Amino acid sequence: MESLVYIALFAPLVSSLFAGLFAMTPKKQFVGVISSLLLFASFVASAILAYHISSTNEIIHVKLMDWIAAGNLNIPFGFLVDYVSVTMMVVVTLVSTVVHIYSNGYMDHDKSFNRFFSYLSAFVFSMLVLVMSDNFAGLFIGWEGVGVCSWLLIGFWYHKADVTRDVNPSISPSWAANEAFIMNRIADLGMLVGLFIIYWNVGSLQYDVVFKAIPNLTPIILTTAAIALFIGAMGKSAQFPLHTWLTDAMEGPTPVSALIHAATMVTAGVFLVIRANPIFSVTPEVSYFIAALGTFVAFFAASMALVNRDLKRIIAFSTLSQLGYMFAAAGLGAYWIALFHLAAHAFFKALLFLGAGNVMHGMHNELDIFKMGGLKKVMRGTYLYMGLASLALAGIFPLAGFYSKDAIIETAFNEGNLILFIILIVTAGMTAFYSFRQVFLTFHGDERYKELGIHPHEMYKYVLIAMSPLAILAVIAGWFKGWFNSFIIHLLPNYEMSEHTHHLALYITLIVSAFAFGGIILAYIKYNKGLVRSEKTENSLIYKLLINQYYIPILYEAVISKPYAELSKLAWKADTKIIDTFVDGIAKVLYVSGDKTRGMQSGNLSNYLNWMAAGAIVLLVVAILSLVAV
Amino acid sequence: MFEQIAFYLFSVLTIGLFLITVFSKNVLYAMTSLASGMVLIAGFFFLVGADFLGVVQLIVYVGAVMALYAFGMMFFNVTKDLKEKTTSNIWVMIIGVTVALLMTLMFGGAINPDAIYASLPINSSMTNPQAVGMALFTKYLVPFEVAAIMLLIAMIGGIVLAGKKMDKSLTDAEDEKIQPKDVK
Amino acid sequence: MVMPINVNLSDLNLPLLTPMLIAISGGLGILVIDLIKSNLHKSLYVMLALMIFGADLVTVLGTAQGRGFFDLMLFDGLSIVSQILILVASMLFIPLALTSKRFHEFSYPEFFALFVFMVAGLQFMVTTDNLILIFIGIETSSLALYVLIAMHNRFYSFEAAIKYFTMGAVAAGFYAMGSAVIYASTGSVELWQISEALKLGSENSNIILITGGAVLILIAFAFKLSLFPFHTWAPDVYEGSSAPLAGYMSIVPKVAAFTVALRIFSIYIDLGLQSVQSIILILSVVTMTLANIMALVQQDVKRMLAYSSISHAGFVMAAIAIGTTKASTAIFVYYALFMFTNLGAFTMLWISRHKVKAFSDRFDHPYEKFAGMIKIVPMGAVVMALFMLSLAGVPPFSVFWGKLYIISAAVDADYIALAFIMALNSAIAAYYYLKLIVYMFLKDPIKSVDTVYYNISKPLMVVVGIAVFVTVGSVFFFDKLHTYIYTMMLAAGF
Amino acid sequence: MIGLNHYLILSGILFSIGLVGVLRRKNLLMLFFSTEIMLNAANVAFAAISNFYNDLSGQMFAFFIIAIAASEVAIGLGLLILVYKKENTLDLDDLASMKG
Amino acid sequence: MSNILTILVFFPALAGLLGFVIDKNSARVYGVAIATVEFILSLFLWMTFDASNPTFQFIEHFPIVKDFGISYYLGVDGISLFLVVMTTFMTLIGMISMSVKDEIKNMVITLLFLEMTMVGVFLALDAIMFYVFWELSLVPMLYIIGAWGGPLRVYASIKFFLYTFTGSLVMLVGMLIVAYSFSQATGGVWSFAITDWYALGFDMKYQIGLFLAFFIGFAIKVPMFPFHTWLPYAHGQAPTIGSVILAAVLLKMGTYGFVRFSLPMFPDASVLMILPIAIISIIMIIYTAMVAYAQEDMKQVIAYSSVSHMGIVMLGIFAMNSEGISGSVFQMLSHGIVSGALFMLVGVIYDRTHTKYMKDFGGLASIMPRYALVFGIMLMASVGLPLTIGFVGEFLVLIGFYKVSPILTILAGTSIILGAVYMLTLFKRSFFGPVTNEANKKLKDLNANELVSFIPLVAVVVWLGIYPKPVLSIIDNSVNYTLSIMEKKAMTPEAKNIIIVKNSKEAK
């Protein structure tokens, strides 16, 4: 079994290094193929491990070697394959494999084809390290690793120039990449602090040791640790106020968006909360905050998705929104439901993104849904997939999203928190609306793309076939809810609905479904026939607010970036003009006083003699005065 | 009484003469008054019983030194009135008076000769020149001889510096241009 | 009636006089040789002088410590150390006459005779504790030195000699007056008696008189040691005289003066006379600081070295105020090490000396002259840089050990602030030494090769070689050196 | 009765006069006169102290000072001749080519 | 090879002397050969080093100036071992990558002398010897900056020299005071041996004064805010090789000094000074990171980033626990390698274009992918990405200092954000975007020579990022030993409490 762990873990690394060897050479198809195969191997290993665990309930814990050892700190490279990590592994490797295969088609014209696979595989490796590590530091390795890969991949088309925000809200891929990295770093600091708190209070960063020690820790320590860790999670999972990078990250190639910014990396924050559930479960205030923030983000992101015109950004907002759901669940203590939604979401969201990628590929990188329409004729397969995924996203029975999202909303109800409950329900309706607004605008109605002279075409067959596992899972994943529950509660606390909720479960489901259907119908009415733009709506305050993402990016720019740059310039000025001038000033004072003093060296002997006499008098006076003074 | 009169007379005269030396614009006056001052100082020596010193003072100073200065003066052609821009008088006076005051302060204090142990007591049985001679050729023989060397140096120095050979400098001349005859 | 006096010859301890007698008779010998046959080449006199100093040195080393000649001569450890330094420096100096180019002074046999007499005078000066003999020694050496400076025979050297002479004469006046005051307060002109008299009578004697005498003498020595504000002669005199003589002046007369100053002022410091001690300290600090900052702005290397010598003297002067045995040792350790480096540096200037001021109307050795030396004569540049680094106190070169020792002496005596001032002054000083290095190593040359090596000859190279050897290898004999001097100081009671 | 203090104060005054001369004079020859005065002032003091302390050292000192003064004159005049031959002046203000 | 340390110290200098006779054209090969031998020697030292022994090894000790207590005293422990290895390594790499054309012989000789002084500083166990090498190292550096530098080279080199020289003179006085106290304590026996000094206790007033005296010497070298202004000039003007050595090794001398002298000799004062130094360090970290962000010149960015990173090192040293100090020592190594590499990288582009301004570049990643790759790796190491060498030290330092003050640690932790800000901005401005400058389109990617010098650097960066244990455990061992000395020596109970020694206390 140990070797399987290593295969699962290192196959992507090998793939990355292999592809990396050819990174600077022109496209080689075999690179893509071999990478995909290696990823598939990783998936198979993960799947076998999953089966092994579910069948034998044996947790696999391997220690590769020591990493950092100093003082009392001892961090090994240890890997833990248990219920939670194996779930993540399966999800990650599965989606990755699909995305790898997909990329063979999607990136076929890109001159950096090989490099792309190298990055992509490296990302998978980092993600696996993140989920499989048996300690917080290892998790942090993966955490930062995915950050870097995300940076590399968002900025994959680094050669694009910066443009203004009006032209492209993300300015440029490289800008977006930097934004993502830096914002994540802000959160990472929180995460690091969390690790420090844990280390100095427990003496170790190993999960098992830490969790065992929780009863000995004071609430205040636990609370600060939980806060710090959650700050880390906020960054990776793009929670408000660190959310702006996620939509900008859409500058990356679409497979990247699918894999990293929908299915896997962004869920790392949720994973962290789930992983560290023993800490969060004893810090109710923090957990409640998480739930509230999650709910808020769910609504907040959904609202922005309502009006957006960019195909990928809409999906990005929906990702954000769904992450909010997951946090809501995790915050409310329903960790397994959060994990379940995470997995289900991974499938349908990746599918959605890949579908969007197909559209983009077919539309020659056009992303504005206002310029599409009627694509279902030319892109049948994609239409099917995206429709399916959108349905799943909207939470329509019996697709995956229905089971998971419904459970979250039920949880909110079960916790008796009506506000969260209502918001989540409303958001569910909004989700359905914007998902189908997008579907209808893209695939139905008039063929607006013709005005632009674009000739869209369907994606390669094998790509569509490769996407099918996701499509299937998007449909059926929810059906395994019960099985998953029994599987995961070996590790995660079970979340039981109260009697009362049980009774009302059906009604809740109906309400949710009603909202979902309502959203779809609204979208159908509005957009099925084609695009109807109304000046009035678009000029309204709310529309403006939403389309500009509540002006938050601009606000950040104005309040943080610009002042920081100005302050930096100021600091530089201070450095050269004040500190350095002071230092030079000392030298200058000495030099100038030397210049002044040398005046006494006039060359005239008479002056010298005067100096001598004056010196004599001074010495005599000083001597006599000092005698008098004594 | 005689001593007192002599002291004050000599003092006033010496001070006056030396002031002339210092302040006179006329070189001749200055030199003459210096020579006279020296004579008076020899007088002081006689007053305090340093007869030998008085004689030496007369011979060496008034005789040799002043003669040298006189020759020098003629050589330098400074017999006329001096046209020198002397240093500001006020400044000089301040310094002079201050030094004088400091000296007075220093010397004005009580000095008790009895507390002093004479390291080279004057033998009252000898005349002053005898005593001086005795000291010079015993205890101070070495300084005496060194002084002789010093005088030799002064002589050689005087000869060299004033000699003709200094007229043509080898230091300033490029080596290639030095004629054999320039080098002795 | 004249009584015959009986003097026991063995009591006179005449061997004490042999070193000086060797020098004096050697000087006379040179004069006699010149009388017998003139027009002899200077190299003969150089060799003669070397032999005289060599014999002198050997006798100094071979002579037992003690008093002699009616207790007038005092041949103690201090005197021995100081004589050794004087003689070694003289032996290093004298070969510098053998340049490839002709300079006026070396065409005189009298130059060598005067030089030897001067050394004899200095030896007398340090081998006595009688103020009279000290005075005669000072004057003997100074008068000879004035002549030696002037014999370089160009206008600058005349001006230098005049300035030195005039100020020297005034300083002699101060010395005479100071001695008179001391004599008035103690009734003696012999230091050991003065010391005893002061100790006995410190209760009821006229303290103003005592202090005043010390200050007046201090003024005379401040002139000799070029302490601020009595230093003004030094830069001009150094510039006016030939480079080797300037280097010599920066060391030998100062060593002698320090020896005497140590003899005199240690009395007052041992007496606990705070005012004298603090005046010396103030003088020392002011001197090192002001000389340093004035050296910063110099355009001529020789003048810079002149100011640097002033600063070094100020540095060492502090040791007198500290007054411990270690501090006294430090004076001579410092000068023993400084001697080689500084003479080496001046020799490098001598090597590059031109008869025509090719680089500046005013200066012989403007910085520009050395620009880009590393590209023209790398070895010369490296050697000069070594000397500069050593002077700046960069370890492990010789002067560093001297500085270390003095600062350590200051620290030991709890003069922490002084130690820091010394350290900071060394830092300031580094700038102007560095300036020359910058010119030599970091700038492009202005003129071609032969201009820098104009005056070189084998003997000069040997002297530089010795200087380099000592400068670089000082770490290996520093142990022996300071132990030796320390024992000597301890024996002499300083 | 004339005390030692009188002589000493006289000596001090003469010394000051000499110093004033040194400071004031710009003609080198005249300046040398002043230095002689300073040395003579010291001589007076030595002779007087010697007398009052009944000690010969002072006279010895004075004697040697006279010798020194004489030697100085010889060297000093030699230097003056050199300068005079070169520059035809003895004024200090003309003798300031080295400065800074 | 009982005198391996002597050989290590003086071999380069001797070779340098012999270098005067080498022909100009072969000078560089000669230099590389010597540096290789020296590097192999240092590796040999590592191999024969007894990892279980935390004290000094390979000791060579005999007196030079007996009465004054100055001795020839060399020894190596876990802290200095790797600094020596890094020194020889970086000298070798620098020598290989050197692009200086004129006066190369002088450069090689100078570098070899510099290597002697650097190795000497780390191996000297006698304070005076330490000081000798410390000061002597300024001279070759002065020459390197001054002779091969940019337009302001003279100013920069003099500033560098004088600033450090001043500081170290103050330190010298401190050393003399310590030596004197030692002689007082032992009744007249003088010693400058650090190991002897370790046994010496001072009362509080003295400790603070001495600590400050040493502090000035070390702080200027580090350089700590506000004594850092010589550094941008020195780096800005120095030739590539100069910057590499300066950043990689010379700055470490200062921090090494703190570990070697200040902490074990003045434990109470060190504890007392934690807060002020931490505040200065944090100012260093944040303020210079901001200044770095404002720079136009790539080299200046890296120069200021050096200051920022040295702030981290300082912080770790004053964490007073083995995590922090070991982390600091490791961070010294990491910063040495990474900043050295970054300076070399800037040198590569400077050699090709003769400009260092970011505005002249843009899109370099498309033209020079290998270069961009190496730069990217070093950049990531610089911002402290896990699994690169940069993370280990920074992580340990922060975790160590967290014990002292959480708030300050969070402030210091902003370095991971601010570092990313300026480094990524630099990378974006010069490597990303379209190629704006036509002339740049013809630029050649890294050539074989450059690759040979960069590949080992990359290898080390990754190797020590993934498996720092062989290095870290040796360092940690010696650091613990140092801490135990400190704890034993500390007089005040507060100090004893703050100094955390492994195994002697539960981490709580």
Image: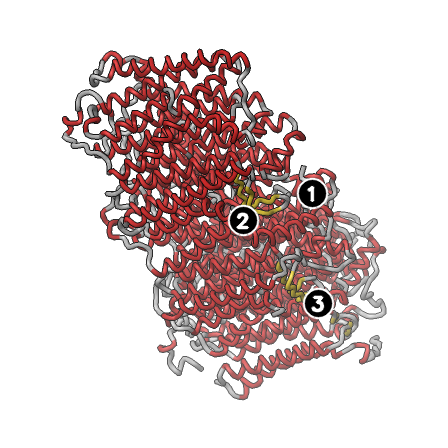
Look at the image and tell me whether residue C326 can be seen. Answer: yes
Left or right placement of residue C225 versus residue E297 in this view: right
Judge depth for marks 3 and 1 and give the one in front: 1
Estimate the x, y position of residue C275 in percent, counting from the top left. Answer: 71, 48
Judge depth for marks 2 and 3 and give the one in front: 2
Estimate the x, y position of residue A64 in percent, counting from the top left. Answer: 54, 49
Mark 3: which secondary structure? Answer: helix
The residue pinned by badge 2 equals A64
- Distance from label 2 to label 3 (Cα)? 63 Å
Badge 3: residue crowd in 10 Å (few <14, some 14–19, many ≥20): some
When asked about the image quadrant of residue E25, the answer is bottom left
Camera-side residue of A518 and C296: A518
State which chain disc 1 sits on.
E
The residue pinned by badge 1 equals E268
The residue pinned by badge 3 equals C483
Residue drawn at x 70%, y 64% as measured from the top left: D62
